Image (cartoon, rainbow, N blue to C red):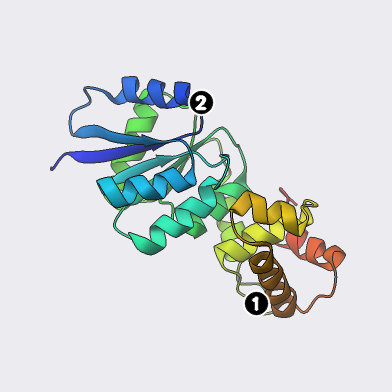
Amino acid sequence: MPEKRLLLVDDHEMIREGLRALLDGVAGLRVVGEAGNGHEAIGACRELMPDLILMDLNMPLLDGISAVSLIHARWSDIRILALTSDVSESNAALALDAGAQGYLLKRSRKDVLLSAIAQVCIGNVFLDQGLDAAQVQALRAAGASSSGVTLTARERQLLKLIAEGARNRDVAELLSISLKTVETHRLNLMKKLDVHNAAELTQWAFRMGLLGKL
């Protein structure tokens, strides 16, 4: 099997150094680059064209889920394994919907990390055993609601942020998009869900399980 080229994406240099040391010398794997946020990850993909990305989700400038979505849209052959400390079925569903092929917790052992990498590289979906797989599947299925409404990963991400109390300006800064773009997304989301205020959007977020287990 050809050597797999890995890109490490995490805003903590110590985490990246630890992963590099952990994977150094593993047969069939080679770390070819690092990035500290989503913007850097996109640039590294353009320059290095890795086979696999180990992607943190909570990062400044451009968060991991947004980066996953953008990278998957541009380079669908690049496999992405979300590597995070966030034990959240809703975030796992968002990451998988955005284009990640796996979701692994940072507390995992080396053998589990290598197993996750192997599974993702051959096209399988990997989900950490610390998560409720049935709940993740239910949350992903909730994207197509009983009323026939289907939300994209970005729309679900936006809905989650609004329900958590983020203002339009906060969302714009978090997702590194313009305030006008956020306002347009929000209006489209309200039209799609046939709601008229933030309270009704929050009800939809609870219904879809985006604010945690119901």
**Location of residue 92 with respect to 206 vertically, above or below:** above
Evaluate whether residue 158 shows in this view. yes
| Amino acid type for the residue under numbered disc 1 | Val
Q: Name the residue rendered at 58%, 40% in the picture.
A: 60
Residue at the farthest left position: 1
Residue located at (47% from left, 34% from top): 10
**Marking on residue 107:** 2
Q: Position of residue 84 (x, y in %)?
A: 52, 36
Residue type at the position of mark 2 = Arg
Residue 187 location, quadrant? bottom right
- Where's residue 96, x and y in %? 49, 54
Of label 2 and label 1, which has the lower sequence position? 2
Residue 57 or 2: which is nearer the viewer? 57
Q: Residues within 10 Å of mark 1 (few under 14, many from 20)?
A: few
The residues tagged by marks 2 and 1 sit, at their Cα atoms, a distance apart of 36 Å
Residue at 51 percent of width and 59 percent of height: 97
- Confirm whether residue 51 shows in the render: no
Secondary structure, mark 2, is loop
Q: Quadrant of residue 30?
A: top left
From the top left corner, tell me how far across and down residue 142 is, in percent: 63, 65
Q: Position of residue 150 (x, y in %)?
A: 60, 74
Where disc 1 sits, the SS reads loop
Dot 2: few (<14), some (14–19), or many (≥20) neighbours within 10 Å? few
Circles 2 and 1: CB atoms closer than 8 Å: no
Residue carrying label 1:
149
Residue name at image x 84 percent, y 75 percent: 196
Question: Which quadrant is the N terminus positioned in?
Answer: top left
Using the image as rendered, state which of residue 163 and residue 214 is in the foreground: 163
